[in-house]
Image (tube, rainbow, N blue to C red):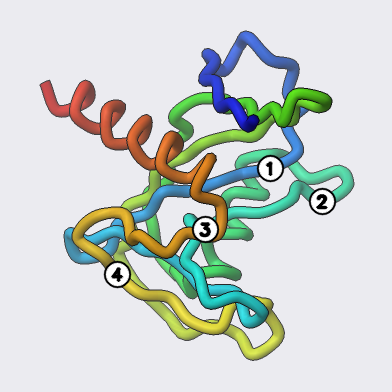
Amino acid sequence: MVTVTFHDKEEIDDARLKFAVIAARYEGKWVFCRHKKRATWEIPGGHREEGEAILDTARRELWEETGAEKFDLSPVCIYGVSDGTEKTYGLLCFAEINKQGDLSDEVEIQETKTFAAIPKELTYPAIQPHLFNHVQGWLNSMSR
């Protein structure tokens, strides 16, 4: 069974963050991407590279997976995913994309698409809805 937890940014040491996931909006809709080897949708994000600052991972992954050229990026929190044997951590971010470009032919993403809500056909259905809902709650608390 997979569990997803959320933590304050200061609660987990930066060195333990292996991933950055970015819930992104463009023109009022949510951006999801589809990997070339899958038929399902996912929130943009990916692995941190050696020596890379985690916010740089978020910026790089957002550009690679969506083609976003200009955007406002905000860290939301740290998330943890446990499968019962191992727990991994990542940075969850929100981005408002202001200028959309094309995807590079060299990336693993086939296409991006905007949705009014989270799509049903998800690559990681046990994880992504939790991340998406957490970002929506964060946005709601920011607008109060």
Residue 65, quarter of picture: bottom right
- Counting other residues with Cα less than 10 Å from the Cα at mark 4, is it few (<14), some (14-19), or many (20 or more)? some
Which label's residue is closer to the chain start, 4 or 3?
A: 3
> Looking at the picture, how far across and down is residue 98, in whole percent?
30, 64
Q: Secondary structure at mark 2?
A: loop
Q: Secondary structure at mark 3?
A: loop
Residue ID for mark 2: 49
Q: Amino acid at mark 1?
A: Phe
Marks 4 and 3 sit apart, C-alpha to C-alpha, by 12 Å
Which label's residue is closer to the chain start, 2 or 3?
A: 3
The residue sitting at 53% across, 41% down in the picture is 126
Marks 2 and 3 sit apart, C-alpha to C-alpha, by 16 Å
Closer to the camera, 136 or 121?
121
Closer to the camera, 113 or 59?
113
Q: Secondary structure at mark 1?
A: strand
**Residue 44 tag number:** 3
Q: Amino acid at mark 2?
A: Glu
Q: Secondary structure at mark 4?
A: strand
Which label's residue is closer to the chain start, 3 or 1?
A: 1
Pointers 2 and 1 in contact (C-beta within 8 Å)? no
Marks 2 and 1 sit apart, C-alpha to C-alpha, by 9 Å
Q: Is residue 12 visible?
A: yes
Pointers 2 and 3 in contact (C-beta within 8 Å)? no
Q: Residue furthest right?
A: 50
Q: Amino acid at mark 4?
A: Thr
Residue ID for mark 1: 19
Closer to the camera, 80 or 125?
125
Residue ID for mark 4: 114
Asked whether, in this view, residue 15 is left or right of residue 8, the answer is right
